[in-house]
Image: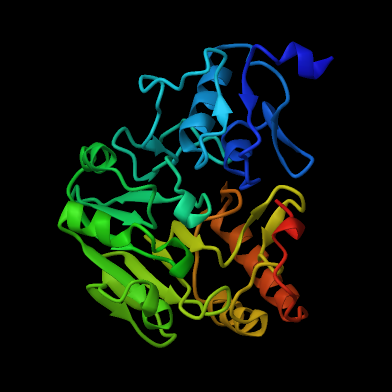
Amino acid sequence: MAGERLADGWRVDERCTNCDVARQLAPGLIGEEGGRSVVLREPRDRAETERLHAAAHACHTRSVHPPSGRLEEVPDPFPMPLDGGNGGNGEGGTDDPDGAVYLCGHNSRQTAGANSYLLRRPDGTVMMVDTPRWSPSLARRYEKLGPVTDVLLTHRDHAAHGRQYADGFGARLWIHEGDLDSAPDADRVLRGTEPVEIADGVVAHPLPGHTEGSVLYLADDRYCFTGDSFHWSRTTGDIEVFDTVTWYSVEELAASLERVAGRISFEWLLPGHGDRRRLPAGEMSERLRRLAARTGELRQRPVDFRAIRW
């Protein structure tokens, strides 16, 4: 039986919260069963083994275990470059030897396992978008990419370690006024709903809906960091909103999407929760317009994590 065959191999323990991160990093190797992740099969080569190690090092509950039972530091791939040219979710490849966007890994329990990113700018500086779990050693590792100047929070759910990382880097902490109570000591506060250029080529677009102070950050008309406002769903094969986990207002989210749909252009969809995706900018724009129309037909629902269509 599969359970017996995998008993001495890779496994996912019962602490799994079904956050989807392991399945994003090890597709085909880790799947979903009974409301949590499970190992589908053992790796067949080095590349597949590396994917499982990435899943293990990202898991916020440390629920993914290698055959030895011990997660070693050496196979830790993070920060992982994402801007690969393979046309899919980009894991493991890079067009630029220096990279432009990296996945932080080491997701945090305090952000419900949300993904976070490092955005490397042409001048060699780096911006962090949302945060992994706090660790001084991780901060030092991320700084090897370049001096981190800004920590950009997309919304309140991902604010847990913002001040620690900002202070550790000597960086500015950003948040929107709608979620300011989650980071009252932020250095920069975004206001209203109009876009704001916060650095050369980086624009903050306030997007109330998932929370009152949700923001998406657009870099170089290429990378779109959406927080939990919208994501790529493997179930539907399209851009979707978390309509069963909209804390503030799905009507406001629909209005926000309608406002930005004809205003922004990007290739990379990089959410906090949900999967990543790279598509041609024109196709992304069309999918975003259709998402705005679909969201306009939704009505507020009770929060139900179990109904998320990953």
What is the x, y in percent for residue 156?
A: 45, 69
Relative to residue 18, is residue 158 depicted above or below? below
Q: Position of residue 123 (x, y in %)?
A: 18, 51
Q: Quadrant of the N terminus?
A: top right
Please provide percent x and percent y for residue 222.
44, 56
- Residue at image coords 18%, 52%: 169
User: Residue at image x 69%, y 28%?
Assistant: 28
Query: From the viewer's perspective, is 2 left or right of 225?
Result: right
**Relative to residue 52, is residue 43 depicted above or below?**
above
Q: Residue furthest front?
A: 14
Work out whether residue 116 or residue 240 is closer to the camera in this orientation and state it. Answer: 116
Q: Is residue 13 left or right of residue 147?
A: right
76 on left or right of 249: left
Residue visible at 59% across and 37% down?
A: 22
- Residue 224 visible in the shown view: yes
- Residue 155 visible: no
Outermost residue toward the bottom in this view: 192
